[in-house]
Image (cartoon, rainbow, N blue to C red):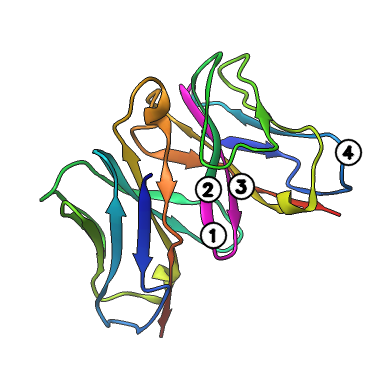
Amino acid sequence: EAQVTQNPRYLITVTGKKLTVTCSQNMNHEYMSWYRQDPGLGLRQIYYSMNVEVTDKGDVPEGYKVSRKEKRNFPLILESPSPNQTSLYFCATGRSPGGYNEQFFGPGTRLTVL
Amino acid sequence: EDQVTQSPEALRLQEGESSSLNCSYTVSGLRGLFWYRQDPGKGPEFLFTLYSAGEEKEKERLKATLTKKESFLHITAPKPEDSATYLCAVQAYAGGTSYGKLTFGQGTILTVHP
């Protein structure tokens, strides 16, 4: 079954404690991206990756890091989380390198930073 | 800077009452405009991609249209199962790898009453 997997699905942590949210896909897609969704602000892109070892900033990259060492995985790293990073996070993939076609979204990770 | 504005923020319809959702956009050069549907607690699900003014696409009770400044999502004879948040997003032509960037509107919450 084609799918995008995110882990963990729910996470409560404290300020400053480094964390990683994983994203994995089994569709052999070139493009992967991270978004955060906040009430009143909608979906905002954090980082995206056109292909392995190629990443670029979205609209809200501050406080986040990503890496794309292999095609199927695109982890999101919060080195020192802060309460303003409390949000619902989505990973997405797309067939074309530019995300030009439809994107497939994961189930989401709800993060709370205390 | 790319901008996407969706209206109305929320729309309540009776079953069978047709209506339209609006997505106004400002981009330097449109590469693609996307419509997604999002159910509560889930990731967005792809509906349509439109590439150029005048283009139209249909799927069941939904029809998406595109002009040079806005897109409409027409819902004909909606059913309660069409209740969801509908998201519009744009991708612009840009240099280097930045054409992978996607900008979303805040969404329209559609409720269809039986």
Viewer-side label of 3, 2: 2
Q: Amino acid at mark 2?
A: Arg
Q: Amino acid at mark 4?
A: Lys
Q: Amino acid at mark 1?
A: Leu
Tell me which numbered mark, 2 or 4, is placed earlier along the sequence: 4
Q: Residues within 10 Å of mark 3 (few under 14, many from 20)?
A: many
Dot 2 and dot 1 residues touching (CB under 8 Å):
yes
Residue position for label 2: A44
Mark 4 lies on a secondary structure that is loop
Q: Amino acid at mark 3?
A: Pro
**Spatial distance from mark 1 to mark 4, Cα to Cα?**
26 Å
Residue position for label 4: A17
**Spatial distance from mark 2 to mark 1, Cα to Cα?**
8 Å
Viewer-side label of 4, 3: 4
Q: Residues within 10 Å of mark 2 (few under 14, many from 20)?
A: many
- Is A79 part of what is drawn in magenta? no
Q: Which mark is residue A107?
A: 3
Tell me which numbered mark, 3 or 2, is placed earlier along the sequence: 2
Q: Which mark is residue A41?
A: 1
- In the image, residue A72 sits, relative to residue B6, either above or below, namely above
Between A27 and B84, the one nearer to me in the picture: B84
Q: Residues within 10 Å of mark 4 (few under 14, many from 20)?
A: few
